[in-house]
Image: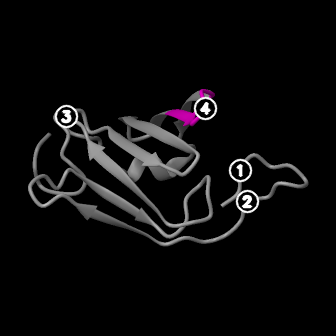
Amino acid sequence: MQWDYREDDIHEGKTVFAIVPDADTPCRGRLLRERGYAEIMPVVGRYQMNDAGGLLLTTDYEIMSAIERFWFVSPDIRMRLSVVKLYGGFSNTALCTETRVGAASEAIPKPPVRHRCLLCSCRR
């Protein structure tokens, strides 16, 4: 992983993660990670797919909490909203639009009008 590049602050490494669906509703559950983004320790977060095919990730760390919402606007456009709340009052919010560039996106089928949960066969 690498982001927020500064000479003295390079984030590199590997992690292992697993998705553990809830038994009654597989479109939500736990996201287990060997190491988190903010803290180098095992982290248990929550995921949930919404009715529009969006993805919500919620993670509580020792010193902060993070909520990320992903919208898959089209096969070529993804939007991401992040809210990071440090315990003690400080918050940071970011909205990103990510666009796939190149011919690779032409091979991806267009999504149906009604989205399907990526983790199970339920229609949400």
Front tag of 2 and 4: 4
What residue is rendered at 22% in x and 60% in y?
A: 21
Q: Mark 4 = which residue?
A: 88
111 left or right, relative to 31: left
Q: Report the amino acid beneath label 1.
A: Trp
Residue bearing mark 1:
3
Residue 44 left/right relative to 34: left
- Judging depth in this view, the residue of 89 and 93 nearest the camera is 89
Which residue has dot 2 on it? Answer: 11
Span highlighted in magenta in the image: 82-90
The CA span between labels 4 and 1 is: 25 Å
Amino acid at pointer 3: Asp
Dot 2 crowding, Cα within 10 Å, few <14, some 14–19, many 20+: few
Name the residue carrying label 3: 51
Kindly identify the residue that appears in the image at 50 percent across and 67 percent down. Answer: 42
Mark 3 to mark 1: distance in Å? 31 Å
Mark 4: few, some, or many residues within 10 Å (few <14, many ≥20)?
A: few
